[in-house]
Image (cartoon, grey):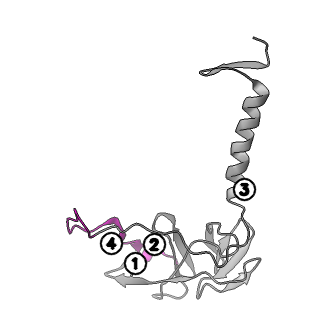
Amino acid sequence: MSDDEVLTGSGTRTRRALLAGAGAVGASVVLAGCGGDDEGAAPPASTPTSGGPGATGAPSAADAPLARTTDIPVGGGAIFVERGVVVTQPTEGEFKGFDPICTHQRCPVSNVDGGTINCTCHNSRFAITDGSVQGGPATKPLPAKQVKVEGGQVYLA
């Protein structure tokens, strides 16, 4: 076996073949995240979190509060990736919810700062008041999501 060959479980392969295969896998992952402008694409389907056979009646994680109202800064917001929502507080006591996926190329937004929800993939910015585009390349606003406040807690409605 030469220095350019590697022993694998299925026999001997050249190092070049292994590296080419690994490069192809990596390239396919990168390209999958850089598709065309998906402004009209439907969001992924979600799985029900309660009801149906085997339901216990206990509250699900979807029913849990997102945060305390004091956790959402006035003039700012917070991103709840696992719950699929950005919550903002444009003015004291006013809470808004938005989809956390940029309408340009479906990257997740990365922060809320300076009165905007920001996507650092391509620098799109959206208003914390209504999700409208404040800076492109995005051309469509972030879709609104309903949130409610009860007992000092913010919930998905």
Q: CA distance from mark 1 to mark 2?
A: 9 Å
Name the residue tied to disc 1: 154
Name the main secondary structure of what is drawn in magenta: loop
Q: In the rendering, which numbered label is found on residue 31?
A: 3
Judged by depth in the image, the label closer to the viewer, 4 or 3, is 3
Residue 63, numbered circle: 4
Separation (CA) of disc 1 from disc 4: 11 Å
The percent coordinates of residue 69 (x first, y second) are: 42, 78
Q: Nearer the viewer, mark 3 or mark 1?
A: 3
* Circle 4/circle 3 CB separation < 8 Å: no
User: Identity of the amino acid at label 4?
Assistant: Asp
Callout 3 secondary element = helix
Q: Residues within 10 Å of mark 3 (few under 14, many from 20)?
A: few
Q: CA distance from mark 3 to mark 2?
A: 36 Å
Judged from this view, the residue extending furthest toward the left is 56
- Tell me the magenta residue range: 51-73
Per the image, label 4 sits on a secondary structure element best described as helix
Residue at image mark 2: 71
Q: CA distance from mark 4 to mark 3?
A: 35 Å
Task: Characterize the local packing of mark 4: few (<14), some (14-19) or many (20 or more) Cα atoms within 10 angstroms.
Answer: few
Q: Quadrant of residue 40?
A: bottom right
